Image: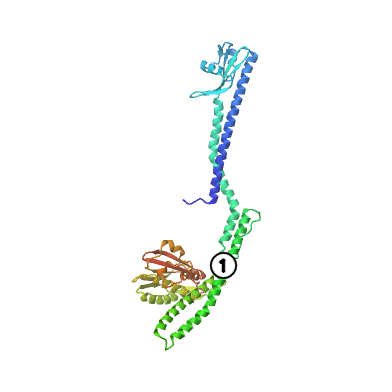
């Protein structure tokens, strides 16, 4: 089970805290009220005793009938003989009250009383106070607490959720601003709150981190672009020198093989340099691909012709289904580079006698979809999220001489055309990449 969002957690914390505080408050109120009621009962019992003997030193049956109905009184003489008692008072309870000079509570299975004895010069009064009314008050209080507790908890939870939303609003604003910052907009900064609090400190820390990232990224970008640019000239010179040596009529056979191998490595370095230079330009955000209206169907058809030759070299079956008349706006050279890269990967990472498929269709939502699949061994699930990382290769042993920039460059070219490139699925025997590009408007076409 995934953890709850922080707003819900704050709401639940408020509800739990409210429960604890209400239980403490209710318990304290209950105990305080109960003992205050007992004190009032004791005072009432004492006042009743003094009122009886004030008018009649030794109260009789008639005087006892005039007391409150929740009071029961027994009159004992100096020898401890019961001389008069209330009709509802049992002798056993009267004797028990006589033996308690200080008030205390007693109860049986279904009833409870407060009992005490009050000695006077001519008699001793044993008073029993029925606690049903006190218990009713306490019971009403407990019922009120139990009925109001769920409502109070719900209000506390909702209030905590609402208050947390107000408190976290600056954090949400910081998050929204930070989400808009990417490799091409590292110059943006999150706004600083007006109050000098933890949020302002967090904003300062984020801005400082973004400044350091921007400096590091620009340094790496400049290095990549400068290094790639500087490498192109010596690589071109080396390529020309090797080709000139290969055309020499007196070149020994042993040297020819080595020069051909060197020429192949120079070609790989040239491709790597070109890819790095293009990626650096795309990352900078200042470089835009030259785009023009073009027939995507014809471009894919031409790429499939080259893909068919690559498939024939590896004894693969090449199948393609291309919908005609699909037009986009883009850079033909870069789109062709993207298509050939995907087709080359589909052929290289395949099995002998396998199949390569290429399908182009109109999705009906203003986009064209190009799906290129193969029947290779598939991509392990744990590595699929890294496919578009630069210099990442699934298997060094079967990389076929690749440098790990192909898919990354393809995705950047797709993004530069307002499209997407993603792995649709990959299982043993079937792997498919999908390119989506926005179709050109009719006027533009």
Q: Is residue 40 visible?
A: yes
Residue 432 location (% of width, % of height): 41, 67
Residue 114 location (% of width, % of height): 56, 22
Residue 164 location (% of width, % of height): 58, 50
User: Which residue is tagged 1?
Assistant: 217
Find the residue positioned furthest to the left: 353
Q: Is residue 88 visible?
A: no
Residue 124 location (% of width, % of height): 59, 14
What residue is rendered at 37% in x and 72% in y?
Answer: 319
Which color scheme does this rendered protein use?
Answer: rainbow
What residue is rendered at 57% in x and 13% in y?
Answer: 76
Give the quadrant of residue 430. Answer: bottom left
Give the quadrant of residue 179. Answer: bottom right
Tell me the crowding category of disc 1: few under 14, some 14 to 19, or many 20 or more residues within 10 angstroms, Cα based. some
What residue is rendered at 59% in x and 24% in y?
Answer: 41
Q: In the rendered view, would you say 372 is above or below 12?
A: below
User: Relative to 111, is 431 on the left or the right?
Assistant: left
Q: How many numbered discs?
A: 1
Give the quadrant of residue 339. Answer: bottom left
User: Relative to 193, is 9 on the left or the right?
Assistant: left
Nearer to the camera, 17 or 213: 213
Looking at the rendered structure, the secondary structure element under dot 1 is helix
Q: In the rendered view, would you say 403 is above or below 59?
A: below
User: Relative to 221, is 346 on the left or the right?
Assistant: left
């Amino acid at each position: 089970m995934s953890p709850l969002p922080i707003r819900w957690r704050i709401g639940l914390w408020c509800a739990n805290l409210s429960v604890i505080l209400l239980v403490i408050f209710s318990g304290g109120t209950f105990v305080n009220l109960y003992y205050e009621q007992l004190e009032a009962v004791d005072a009432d019992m004492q006042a009743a005793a003094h009122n009886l003997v004030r008018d009649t030193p030794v109260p009789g049956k008639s005087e006892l009938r005039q007391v409150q109905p929740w009071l029961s009184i027994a009159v004992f003489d100096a020898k401890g003989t019961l001389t008069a008692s209330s009709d509802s008072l049992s002798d056993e309870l009267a004797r028990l009250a006589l033996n308690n000079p200080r008030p205390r509570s007693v109860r049986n299975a279904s009833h409870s009383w407060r009992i005490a004895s009050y000695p006077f010069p001519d008699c001793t009064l044993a008073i029993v106070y029925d606690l049903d009314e006190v218990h009713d008050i306490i019971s009403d209080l407990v019922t009120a607490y139990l009925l109001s507790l769920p409502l109070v908890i719900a209000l506390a939870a909702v209030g905590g959720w609402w208050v947390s939303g107000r408190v976290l609003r600056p954090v949400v604003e910081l998050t929204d601003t930070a989400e808009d910052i990417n490799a091409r907009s590292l110059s943006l900064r999150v706004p600083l709150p007006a109050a000098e609090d933890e949020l302002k400190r967090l904003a300062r820390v984020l801005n400082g981190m973004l400044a350091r990232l921007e400096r590091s990224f620009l340094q790496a970008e400049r290095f990549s672009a400068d290094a790639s640019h500087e490498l192109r000239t010596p690589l071109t010179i080396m390529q020309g020198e090797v080709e000139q040596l290969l055309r020499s009529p007196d070149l020994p056979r042993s040297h020819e093989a080595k020069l051909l191998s060197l020429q192949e490595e120079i070609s790989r370095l040239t491709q790597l340099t070109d890819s790095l230079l293009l990626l650096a330009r795309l990352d900078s955000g200042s470089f835009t691909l030259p785009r023009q209206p073009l027939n995507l169907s014809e471009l894919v058809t031409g790429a499939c012709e080259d893909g068919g030759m690559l498939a024939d070299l590896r004894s693969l079956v090449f199948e393609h289904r291309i919908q005609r008349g699909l037009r986009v706006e883009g850079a033909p050279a870069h789109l062709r580079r993207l298509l050939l890269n995907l087709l080359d990967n589909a052929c290289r990472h395949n099995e002998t006698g396998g199949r390569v498929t290429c399908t182009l269709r109109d999705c009906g939502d203003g986009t064209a979809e190009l799906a290129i699949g193969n029947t290779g061994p598939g991509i392990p699930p744990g590595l699929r999220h890294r496919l578009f990382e630069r210099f990442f290769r699934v298997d060094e042993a079967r990389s076929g001489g690749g440098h790990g920039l192909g898919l990354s460059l393809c995705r950047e070219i797709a993004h530069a055309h307002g499209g997407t490139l993603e792995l649709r699925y990959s299982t043993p025997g079937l792997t498919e990449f999908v390119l989506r590009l926005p179709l050109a408007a009719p006027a533009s076409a």
